[in-house]
Structures are given as C-alpha cells and as structure tokens.
Image: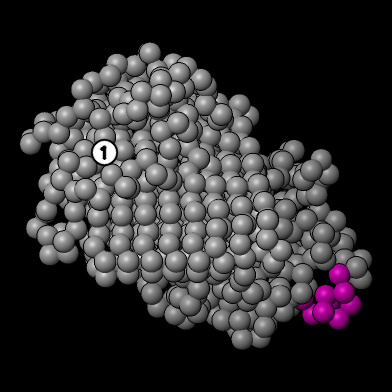
Amino acid sequence: MLRIRDLEVSVGGRKVVTGVNLSVGSNELHVIIGPNGSGKSTLLAAIMGLSRVNILNGSIIFEETDITYSPSYERAKLGIALAHQNPPSIKGVKFSEIVKNLIKRCGCSDYTIMSKMLRVDEFMQRDLFVGFSGGERKRAELYLVMLQNPKLALLDEPDSGVDVESLNLIAEFINLLIKRGSSAVLVTHSGNILSKLSRIDRVHLMIDGNIIFSGLADEVVPLVFKYGFKKTAEALGKVGGEG
Amino acid sequence: MRVDLKEQLISLLKRPSSFGPDIDLNNYELSEPKIIERLDIGDDFTKASSRLGLEDKSKLNYVQINESAMYEALRESLRKYNVKVLPLRKALDEFMYVKDMVWKLVKPDQDKYTAASYLYGGELGYFIYVPSNTNVPIPIYSCLAITSNNKVQFAHNVIYVDEGSEVQVVTGCLVPHGIKGGLHIGISEFYVGKNSRLTFTMLHAWSEGIHVRPRTGVRVNAGGEYVNYYVIYSPVASLQTYPTITLGADSKASTSSVIAGSGEGIYDVGTKVILAEDNSSVELLSKVVAKDAAEINARSDVVAESLGKGHVECLGLLLSPKSKISSIPALTSKKPGAILSHEAAIGIIAQEELEYLMSKGFKEDEAKSILIRGFIDIDVKGIPLSVKAEIDRVLDLIASNIASG
C-alpha cells in the first residue's frame, strides 16, 4: 500500500528525515517509536504532503501512485488521513462545519454513534480546537480521521497529553479502524498506548531522522521501556532499517 | 427654502468632503424623483437582489429604482401593528410631525453630498414609523437599486421607533450586472425612542463603477438600544460613510460591520459614537477583508461626554500585496470614570490553518473560503433568524468570491 524509498526531508532548511525506507501493507498497523525530535512527525507530514516540509530526495508511492510531490488534499482524496499532533485553533470555524463537509465527501454512515462514543458531540458547535483540552483535541482529530474512512491513517502522537480515560477511548477507536480494514502508521514517543492496541504488525525505532531498526513489537518495545531509546538503539542499531 | 441656505448649499457642492475621494457631481445625471403606483421590476433587479437574499418581491415594503419609488404602505402583515412605511416625501405631505424629524440628525450643510440631496433629492427614500409599545415581529424590508448608467440616486430614509417599541429593518442596496457607473447618496436619520430597540441591517452589493456616499445620524433615547449590522461585498469605485450615533442615558448601541473590499475600490468606512449621557455603552466591531488592489480605511471614534463604556474592535485580513487596510480608532474621554478601549489586528491567512484544512481534503480555494467565512462571522444578538439566514447567505457568498482568485 505505502512504499517509501530513501526519503530525505528538511524543515526550515534543516534536514530532519535522512533516508527513510518504509513499507506498509494493506490492513497493517505500524508503530514508529523514537525520542522527541527524531523526525517522526516530519515523516508523517511528508507522507501527508504538508507544505511546511520540503522533500529533498526519495519517493513516496501509495497504491502504485507516486505521490511524492502531490498536494495534501489530493492525498486525502486518495485515502490518506492524518490525525495531527497539534491541530491549530481556528476561530470562527465550527467543528461541526468540518464534520459536515467530511461526512458529505466521504459518506461515513455511523458518524452519530462515533461522535457519541468519542464524546465529540459536546463540542460540535465550538470553534475548531479553540479552548480544547489535550484529550478533546486528540478525540476530535481521531473522529475526523474516522469520518474520512481512510485506507491509510497517519496518527501523530495520539497518546500524548491525554488522560487515561481518553487514552482508552483513542486506543479503542484505533483498534476499530484496523478492524474495518484500514492501515495505520502510529507515531509515539511515550509508547503509552501500545499495550492497549489489539494488534501491532511492525514497530520501527527512529533515531536522528532515520529508522534504525524494524521488528515485531515484542522485539523492540520491552527494550525501549527498559533501557530507553539510546541504549536500545545501540543494541539494535546494527540491524538497520527496512530495505 | 431660505435663499441664504440655498446659496450656501450650492457653494458647498464644489467643496471636497473631508473623507474619501472627491466626486464631481456634474458627472452624474439627475432624474426627476417620483413616486409611482407600479414599478417595473425587471429580471435584472430580481437577479441582483438575489445576491442579497431579497429576490422575494412580496416581502419588500419599499422599493426604489433610480429615482422612482414604489411602496405598499400597509401590507397586510404590518397593518395590525399600525406601522407606517411610505416614501418620505409622501409622509412629509401627510403628517405634520415628520418635518421635525428630517435634516435634524444629518444637516444639509454637512458636506457636498448632503447639500446635493437637500437641493435635488426630492425627499425620496422611506419613512418608517413604529407607534409606541409595539413589537413588530416581522422584519421590514426595503431595497434601493441603480439600474441605469451614470445616474445619481438620492434616498433619504427616516425611521422613528416610538417609546417602548421594537422593530427590525433590513435595507439592501444594489446594482444589476452591466451597470458601469453611478452615484448613490443616502441620508439616514434614525430615532430610537425611550426603552425602544431598532435592529437595522444594511446589505450593500454595488459594482466597480459605483460611488456610494451614505450619511447617517442615529439618536438613541434613554434606555433604548440600536443594533446595526452592515455588510458590503462586491467591488465599488468608492464608498465613504461615517455615521454618528448619539446615546442617551442607560442606552446602548452595537455595530458590526463586514467590509469585503475587492477590485480597485476605496472603502472609507467608520462610525462615530457620542456617549452623551450617563450609563450609555457601545461596542463597535468591524471585520475587514481586502483583496486585489482594494484600499480600506476602517475608522471609529468614541467620545465619552458622560459616564459610559465604549469598546472598539477592528480585525483585518489582507489577501493581496496590492491591497491595503488601515485601522484608525480614536477614543476621546471628557469624563473621568468613562471606560473606553480598543483593539485592532491586521493579518494574513495563517499558513498553518490553510495547511491543516488542505490535509483534510479541501482544495486551497475551499480551505481559504472556510477560513475567510470563519473570519467574517459575527454573532449579533437580536437579529431574527430569517434575517440572520440572509446575512449568512451573503457572508457565504463573500467567502467564496473572495477566496476564488
């Protein structure tokens, strides 16, 4: 479904992603774990085609289409959806307006039930992300991703800055997303959510702009929790990223 | 008319006004102002009025096309409230008291445009009277249009809301497509009686060649309230207006303006408010969007002559490097204890917000339109739902027009 080759990305003139290779198959959940500033969010931004990142080299292929330089709205229409880590507060634009547009475009049918379950109906008439708590932001972003019924969901730190209740809810919906047949790439630095996910197909350890190890969750996650990113990277670094 | 006043006004016709580009009145053709039984409302008018949500002719109480006015003074819906809606000239003929209401809040010698209106306007325009202790639940609609090239249109509108009453008035001003030039001079005098409320909505849809010079005075008596919603979209050659609102004891006013400037139009729009008596308060809010080579001056002036409160807010969005927005707020306090404040900000569309919406599948124009619509949205209390729906429609149009190139 998604093939990334030798991807190099800069932000504000600084190279942040330095030659990433990554393949995600249909209905797979991949987790990218790494410390703050390792380039995880930039990698997702590059896959989504956000204009703040600059692709220096490499390619992004989605379902046999080269999207390396496509604008983000075209990627969204192809079936890629991004749950932003820090979505901007937009005054005057109601959350419900974006919801209405996505329902109309993507034809999601169970939006009412999902809005209740994710408890987003309570801020439907509020301005987009204005005064939202951390948990509300994450739930709102996940809801918008669910409405898009994506083939590939990019989930940027869905577990950061949320309380346990919201974390459980978010995990539940990520599990539902996979159950419905979507693929997902989830980025996390805390790993808080990982134990709540029903299935993880692959975990990638990203350090200093590159994936230095890819493997099963059991191979990577316990080491990270026990020894931290640096020592785990030293122990696993020789294995290298996906080819 | 007194000879000396007439001479004074004629001499004024050559003197440029203090604000806005000067207009040579000789460039425009005067027509004989007339009131007629049936007015030929063509497709052009209907099409143009639909831009303001006023295409339903059956709800219009007063229509003025160029210098011809048509009205239905006592529509069935208004009859039971004893509301009067008729051309001002006719009202001056029929009711003695009306002469005490005209040219009091706007003076004939204010500038060349008021002088021209006084000399040649023929007191066309509407007169609306709401008797005391009357709540009129349905909005009163009027529409003023210029449908011929290079005409000058005069409209002198007087609204008098008597004590303890409430009314909503909606006025649309427009030109159909194809009108390249014209001049609209509107004189408005609004009286809000003791403990009364007037909600006045003005929607403007002109075109590139039209110059617009409204002159407005509002007097709000003790305990009264004046709510004003002003929206202009579509280009103009120039628009210059600077209404004055005078507030009595315990009265309040709020004005919300949306100015969407485009083309090479010059928009000089402001409001002056005098807190004349104690415990009066005002809030002036303007949202200004400029694209192409439009130039917008958003002025405001709150003068506290008594204990009162005034707040001014102006937010601008600059969409083109050739456009220009100036926010010119003034606060003057002559009374210790009066509280006056203002805030202003002029910016561009935030790239982060645009990028966010595009990542949700909105094309750049669609995303801009959503952001502009959000920016110009104003929550005005007291606007009836039917009028709010029309305003929303106009704001939707503004957002999509401004965002698309």
Q: Nearer the viewer, residue B321 or A147?
A: B321
**Residue furthest toward the front?**
B3
Left or right: residue B113 compared with residue B359 = left
The answer to whether residue A93 of the structure is visible from this angle is: no
Q: Residue at x 38, y 66 (%)?
A: B194
**Residue furthest toward the bottom?**
A165
Left or right: residue B202 compared with residue B21 = left
Magenta stretch in the rendered image = A221-229
**x, y percentage for residue B53?**
27, 46
Q: Residue at x 33, y 43 (%)?
A: B102
Membership of A109 in magenta stretch? no
Task: Read off the residue under disc 1.
Answer: B125
Q: Residues within 10 Å of mark 1 (few under 14, many from 20)?
A: many
Q: Nearer the viewer, residue A182 or B52?
A: B52
SS class, disc 1: loop
- Tag 1, which chain? B
**x, y percentage for residue B39?**
11, 33
**x, y percentage for residue B329?**
64, 46
As drawn, B391 above or below B326 = below
**x, y percentage for residue B226?**
42, 59
Membership of A225 in magenta stretch? yes
As drawn, B273 above or below B166 = above
The answer to whether residue A109 of the structure is visible from this angle is: yes
Q: Quadrant of residue A171?
A: bottom right
**Quarter in which the N terminus of chain B is drawn:** top left
Q: Residue at x 90, y 68 (%)?
A: A230
**Residue furthest toward the top?**
B27
Q: Main secondary structure of the magenta part?
A: helix
